[in-house]
Amino acid sequence: MSVKILAIESSCDDTGAAVLVDGKILSNRIANQQVHEQYGGVIPELASRAHQENIVPVVDIALQTAGVKPEELSAIAFTQSPGLIGSLLVGSCFAKSMAMALDIPLIGVHHMQAHVLANFIDDPKPSFPFLCLTVSGGHTQIVLCESPLQMRVIGETLDDAAGEAFDKSAKILGLPYPGGPLIDKYAKEGNPARFKFPEPRIPELNFSFSGLKTAILYFLQENQQKDPSFITSNLADICASIQQRIITILLNKVLKASQETGVKDIAIAGGVSANSGLRQALQEYGEKHGWRTFIPKFEYCTDNAGMIAITAYYKYLAGEFASLDAVPTARAAF
Ligand code: KG4
Ligand code: ZN
């Protein structure tokens, strides 16, 4: 009998629903929340209200697109952690109600593990063991993956995440939230060698981005004082130079991790892996150092329910189910 899973993602500000049949994603729908843009960041209370409005239509359309009826489903999966607790509660309550009504198993998924397994949605897939650089708005991790459900964080950020480094830099430049994609856009027209920002010396495989943010702030303040149109007349070069530094901080640590572990299958995941400069630089590092590199399709990089569905599929095969009293948590290791 085939395995049909409905997966729900509601960890932050996007409501996602996906349907998977026998390891293949048949639909992957997302409702973005525009309401946060005016505040320059995600407002948790507004996010949970918007999830409540969006969840029924998004699930409906995911099932319709996949041509799967609720009564055909084998299990319901949901993001259990980490994330905004109010947002997680909306997704988990919905998933539990549906699992209870249909009398089918419930599967709780770790959002960061799911970002890594987004690399298993399409072919070619990495071989085990592989390293994954997971870079999102809340996390920056190097993960050593031994099997789909066995992975270990071997390096992580000590302060800001890579996505925050993009978004906070964008904010200093006066760009709207989330600024990461905008820095990417302007960087395409700019010269990444024009301005030099420092690379922090952080021990082992860990990262730090707070010093970079301060360096950017002082650099811009100083130049704006001399020339009030400095940012507007140099925007593309500034964005390209900031992006270049974030990318080299990330990939130099991945290089170190690869040298220390001997692992040469390298994947990236998370919202920041949508960055075109990072995607290109990963290919270049790969060619230079003999890596096989893996990048999920764009729609599976930023938050999505497809990655929750593929993780749930491996959990289903392993018999790892959640009980109806499973509690979502804002923070959790995997
Ligand atoms: O994984 P994600 O969608 O949500 C979290 O779980 O955090 O990541 C969101 C982050 C934001 O910081 C956003 O600015 C960043 O990913 N991001 C990008 C790009 N697209 C999304 N950063 C740089 N370049 C992009 N193209
Ligand atoms: Zn995420």
Image (spheres, rainbow, N blue to C red):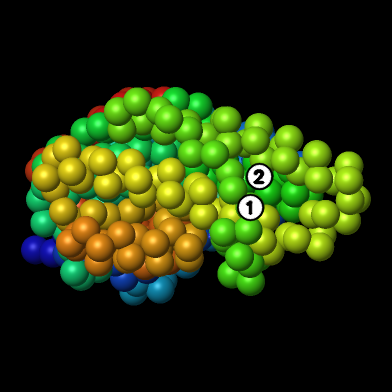
Residue 243 in view of the camera: yes
Mark 1 or 2, nearer chain start: 2
* Residue name at image x 45 percent, y 51 percent: 247
Cα distance, mark 1 to mark 2? 14 Å
Please tell me the numbered disc located at residue 169: 2
Residue 55: x percent and y percent?
52, 52
Q: Amino acid at mark 1?
A: Phe
**Image quadrant in which you'd find residue 92:** top left
Residue 150: x percent and y percent?
15, 38
Front residue (pair 88, 274): 274
- Seen in the picture, residue 32 relative to 209 is either above or below; the reply is below
Mark 1 highlights which residue? 195
**Circle 2: element type:** helix
Front residue (pair 315, 296): 296
Please tell me the numbered disc located at residue 116: none
* Residue name at image x 48 percent, y 63 percent: 277
Q: Amino acid at mark 2?
A: Ser
* Residue name at image x 51 percent, y 48 percent: 245
